[in-house]
Amino acid sequence: MKDVARLTAYFAATILVAALLAPLLFWSAQSLAGHGLFPSLAKYDFETFFHRAILVAAALLLWPFLRVNHVRRMADLDLGPNPRWSHHLFAGVVIAAVPLLCCGALLIAFHVYSFRHTFAWLRFGKMLVASITVPFIEEAFFRGIILGVLLRTGRKYMPILLVSAIFAAAHFLKAPERTSDMVTWTSGLNSIYHSLGRVVDPMMLASAFATLFVIGWILADARVLTRSLWLSIGLHAGWIFGSGTFSRLARQQIITLPWLGKNLLEGIVPLGIAALTWVIIRIWLKYDRISEV
């Protein structure tokens, strides 16, 4: 229970520090842009800086959080070396991306999506970078540190449930654009309020939160089963790459909420694809272990 209380305090402190830090980041950026330095910063609204402030606050408070929880090495987080790390990484990418792209092909066949006339290579490049960097950062944080700390309670499913819910909710910690037209010291708190409003929206819960929760559960399950982050990193990268690539190749023709959201990672249909991927992972791990013997 102490670990859970410390984790709760860590997240509460992260949100509070981010709320106070975001106005400073915004005003600093506007000042630099006003003096002719980095003028492109002027186009970003306050919510963009608030989202970055959360990342900065989480990083700043991470070291004291680990110290308080007596985390000194990977073994303290129930993680060990994985001699088959490249095998798990590659398998994760394929197992996640292929079902997602097959789903996309069916959506095009049924005229829910249609091919774009041009391919945005610049956006594809940015997505490719994100599919490499984001999984390492988020898996190390959510499934590595947070789940590792909670697993020390001796339980398995409750920590997975909590981390999956936190993972899904974290993707909603950004209010709609232009929520704070006039930025004050309380604008960060205002952003938190509007972010929570998105989470309780029934349509948003059905189309996005539930899918992200299941994806988080699958990633956590892969981490626990392998006592390593490599399979979950591969899965995470495969989902980002598959969804991102399809978004650059095709565009949605029909609004089908809650069946499909703005991409292949939101909606009831992607939820079903994620569940199928989970079954594939379980079967693959079973036979992969047999092949090791």
Image (cartoon, rainbow, N blue to C red):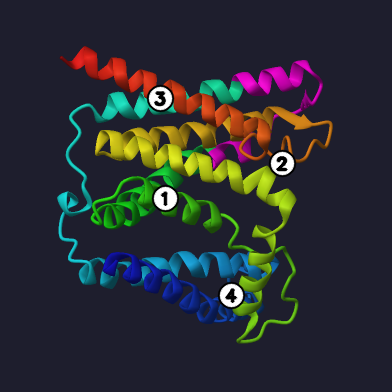
Q: Of tags 4 and 2, which is closer to the observer?
A: 2
Check contact, mark 1 vs mark 3: CB within 8 A: no
Count of numbered circles on the image: 4
Q: Amino acid at mark 4?
A: Ala
For marks 1 and 3, the one nearer the N-term is 1
* Nearer the observer, 59 or 106: 106
Q: Amino acid at mark 2?
A: Lys
Disc on the earlier residue, 3 or 4: 4
Element class at badge 4: helix
Query: In the image, what residue occupies the spot 46% across and 78% down?
Result: 17
Q: Nearer the viewer, residue 114 or 122?
A: 114
Q: Does the residue at mark 3 contact the one at mark 4 (Cβ under 8 Å)?
A: no
Give the residue furthest to the right: 254
Q: Residues within 10 Å of mark 2 (few under 14, many from 20)?
A: some
Residue 48 picture location, percent across and down:
61, 65
Question: Where is mark 4, residue-wise?
Answer: 29
Which residue is disc 1 drawn over?
A: 138
Nearer the observer: mark 1 or 3; the answer is 3
Q: Is residue 197 left or right of residue 88?
A: right
Amino acid at the residue labelled 1: Glu
Q: Is residue 61 left or right of residue 38?
A: left
